[in-house]
Amino acid sequence: MDDEIFTITQAAHYLKVCDKTVRRLIKANKLTASKVGDRSWRIRKIDIDMYLKDNTNELKGVAINE
C-alpha cells in the first residue's frame, strides 16, 4: 500500500538505520517528511521509496569495485 505513513522509528526500521539517521536525512532535506505537532514527524512510504531510488548507485553512475 503506497499511502502508508511511518513514524521516525518505523522509517528507520524500514531503512535499517537508526532514528538519528532518519532525523538527519529530514533535516538535510534529503527525505521528505511532515511535522505533526511540536516534535513528531511522519514520512510517507512512497517518499522513502523515492529517496532510495534517487540514491541508488546505478542512477548516479557509481561503480562498485569488487
Image (cartoon, helix red, strand yellow):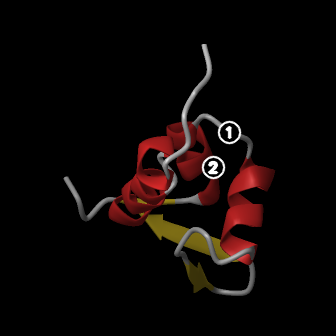
- Does the CB distance between marks 2 and 1 fall below 8 Å? no
Question: Looking at the picture, does residue 66 appear above or below residue 43?
Answer: above
Q: Quadrant of the C terminus?
A: top right
Q: Which residue in the protein does label 1 denote? A: 17
Q: Is residue 2 left or right of residue 41?
A: left
The tag on residue 39 is: none
Residue 64, horizontal then vertical, whole percent: 57, 27
Taking depth in this image into account, of 45 and 9 the one nearest to the observer is: 45
Residue 41, horizontal then vertical, whole percent: 61, 72
Q: Is residue 24 left or right of residue 26?
A: right
Looking at the image, which residue sits at the far top?
66
Q: Is residue 58 left or right of residue 2?
A: right
Taking the spot 65% from the left edge, 78% from the top edge, the residue there is 29
Amino acid at pointer 2:
Thr
The quadrant holding residue 24 is bottom right
Question: Looking at the picture, does residue 65 appear above or below residue 29?
Answer: above
Secondary element at tag 2: helix
Secondary element at tag 1: loop
Residue 46, horizontal then vertical, whole percent: 33, 62
Q: Is residue 11 left or right of residue 29?
A: left
Taking depth in this image into account, of 49 and 62 the one nearest to the observer is: 62
So how many labels did they put on this image? Answer: 2
Taking depth in this image into account, of 54 and 34 the one nearest to the observer is: 54
Pointer 2 or 1: first along the chain:
2
Taking the spot 39% from the left edge, 61% from the top edge, the residue there is 50
Taking the spot 63% from the left edge, 49% from the top edge, the residue there is 9
User: Counting other residues with Cα less than 10 Å from the Cα at mark 2, is it few (<14), some (14-19), or many (20 or more)?
Assistant: some
Amino acid at pointer 1:
Val
Q: In front: mark 2 or mark 1?
A: 1
Q: Which residue in the protein does label 2 denote? A: 9
